[in-house]
Amino acid sequence: MYLLSISLLSGSLGMETEGSSDAYQQQEAILSQIERGEATPSSAVAGRASQPVTRVPRTIGPSSVLIKCWTTCIDFLRSAIGLLCYLFYSLGRHVVGKPQDDEMRIRLLTWIKNTLPANHSRRMDVLNELSSVINARYDLYGSLQDLEERTRLCTEALNLCPPGHPHRDSSLNNLASAFRKQYDRSGSMDVLEKALRMHREALELRPPGHPTRDSSLNNLASALRKQYDQSGSMHVLEEAVQMYREALELRPPGHPRRDTSLNGLANALFDQYDQSGSMDVLEEALQMY
């Protein structure tokens, strides 16, 4: 028992003061006292426990440096390979357009997305491109899985565009459009409210004079009409009509999307006529056609 106490004492002292010559001399002195009967192992351990423990800071060895360098090299290679594949994809994406080609594009873009690091400067472009192709496939087949995947991709792209980012308005618009399609599928007012918030924020980032302000106005008007269909609120309908009018002003005769604004405004005016019975409103709606 005595020898066991000695060995435990030695081990505990040695482990706590590894690398310290002063601690080693102190340990030898304590063991000498025990051998001469001047102290017992238990009293020595108790006295030692009351003293502060000296710990030698650990240093980073060569192996840690090598592991860090190897990890950095792997991340760099992944980034370079993913970027190279995206550049090749960008050069050839305009020569495909068939559904089977879209399947190939989705597989390639998904691989590029999984290869690029989360903070890569081109990751947002890949996310937007992939969500666009998946949206086209949803329009063809109506898969709920594609709709949910598009929403996830648009959400990730928006997270890469914090306030002040030059492309935040486009990301907001893309996510709002995804929510609108989700609403068309589910009829959830919560989803529609999300779409409206996104469209309003995008419109704020596209002030008068912005080249794509007309699209934000038209998109917001369309979402407001959907809200009116659910609520029957005249205030919502009047705001939708106002948005359509502003969009139409920015799309003069000859504009490639003027017909969209004309049709949207006419439908909103017909809704107004159904509520008010005004012949002036009905005549204006008919002029839109």
Image (cartoon, rainbow, N blue to C red):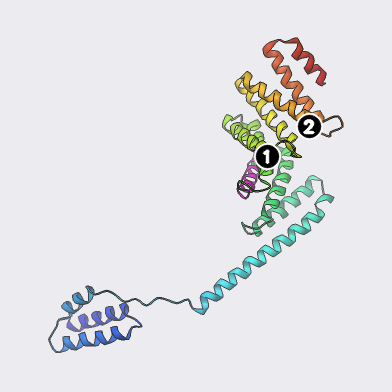
Badge 1 amino acid: Asn
Q: Main secondary structure of the magenta part?
A: helix
Q: Is residue 243 above or below residue 145?
A: above
Q: Nearer the viewer, mark 1 or mark 2?
A: 2
Horizontally, residue 284 falls left or right of residue 22, namely: right
Asked if 284 appears above or below 114 in the picture, the reply is: above
Q: Residue at x 24, y 87 (%)?
A: 28
Residue, x 67% and y 21% (percent of image)? 238
Judge from the rendering whether residue 135 lies leftward or rightward of residue 31; answer left or right.
Answer: right
- The kind of secondary structure element at disc 2 is loop
Q: Secondary structure at mark 1?
A: helix
Q: Is 225 rendered above or below residue 114? A: above
The C terminus, quarter of image: top right
Q: Is residue 219 visible?
A: yes
x, y (%) of residue 103?
A: 74, 49
Q: Image quadrant of residue 288?
A: top right
Would you name the residue on which mark 2 appears? 250
Query: Dot 2: within a 10 Å radius of its alpha carbon, few (fewer than 14), some, or many (20 or more) residues?
Result: some
Name the one closer to the observer, 129 or 282.
282
Picture coordinates of residue 143 (x, y %)? 68, 39
Query: Would you name the residue on which mark 1 appears?
Result: 173
Whichever of callouts 1 and 2 sits on the residue coming sooner in the sequence is: 1
The residue positioned 22% from the left and 73% from the top of the image is: 50
The amino acid beneath tag 2 is Leu
Stretch of the chain drawn in magenta: 146-162
Give how far apart the Cα atoms at labels 1 and 2 are.
Answer: 18 Å
Query: Quadrant location of the N terminus?
Result: bottom left
Locate residue 230, reporting x and y percent. Answer: 61, 23
Asked whether 49 falls inside the magenta stretch, the response is no
Q: Which mark is residue 275?
A: none
